[in-house]
Amino acid sequence: MLRAGVVAVLALAMGGCAGGVHLKNPIKIKHHRVTRSTMQLPPSDITTIGVNAYLWRASLDALSFMPLVQADQAGGVIATDWYANPQNPAERMKVTVAILDKDLRSDALRVTAARQVSQGGGWVDAPVEAATVQRLEDVILTKARTLRQATLIK
């Protein structure tokens, strides 16, 4: 259900973004293969990975439908490759999530996105609405809080 919400948020973002954030120089990242087994972090790893494990797991879950190019647990950076919604292949989006702290706080999460549209046989940079990035941050934070609550109840 969460994945469907993120897909909907990104689909809305890719379907007619007008103003907002425009990233001409997205963060440079090193590329390496990420396996889905990387996503299986027990809550006890909260202090061993360098960042908040709930934010880490929630971010991986929220971005699981996009191809990952980097997932650096020690540095707290998750970066996706370009993703085009099959219903709108003329637009594509790339997302980078940075987890900045070991605490589960809203200011411990930074999401950036880049968007391109197909034009004249090539891809051209296009703006991303700030609200789109904010919605994705909200999805990740909500999922992280849910994961934390589930751990506390057990």
Image (spheres, helix red, strand yellow):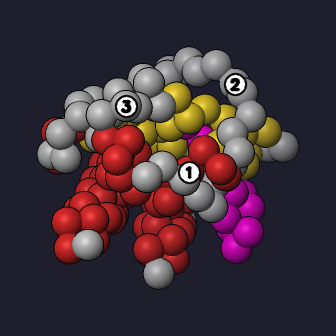
Does 6 lie within the magenta span? no
Which class describes the residues within 10 Å of circle 2: few (<14), some (14-19), or many (20+)?
Answer: few
- Within 10 Å of the Cα at label 3, are there few (<14), some (14-19), or many (20+) other Cα atoms? few
**Foreground residue, 118 or 130?**
130
* Mark closer to the chain start, 3 or 2: 2
The numbered disc on residue 39 is 1
Horizontal and vertical percent for residue 138? 27, 60
Q: CA distance from mark 1 to mark 3?
A: 15 Å
Mark 3 residue type: Thr
Q: Position of residue 21 (x, y in %)?
A: 35, 40
Residue placed furthest toward the right: 121
Q: Is residue 83 magenta?
A: yes
* Residue drawn at x 54%, y 53% as measured from the top left: 40
Q: Which residues are magenta?
A: 79-90
Instruction: Give the amino acid type for the residue marked by disc 2 in the picture.
Output: His
Q: Decide which of 153, 75 is in the foreground and name it.
A: 153
Up the image or down, 33 lies above or below 147; here it is above
Q: Quadrant of residue 85?
A: bottom right
Q: Nearer the viewer, mark 1 or mark 3?
A: 3
Question: What kind of element bears circle 1?
Answer: helix
Residue 79, image x, y percentages: 55, 36
Marks 3 and 2, how far apart at CA:
23 Å
- Which numbered disc, 1 or 3, marks the residue that appears first in the sequence? 1
The residue under label 3 is: 48
| Residue that mark 2 sits on | 31
User: Vertical placement of 53 versus 28: above or below?
Assistant: below
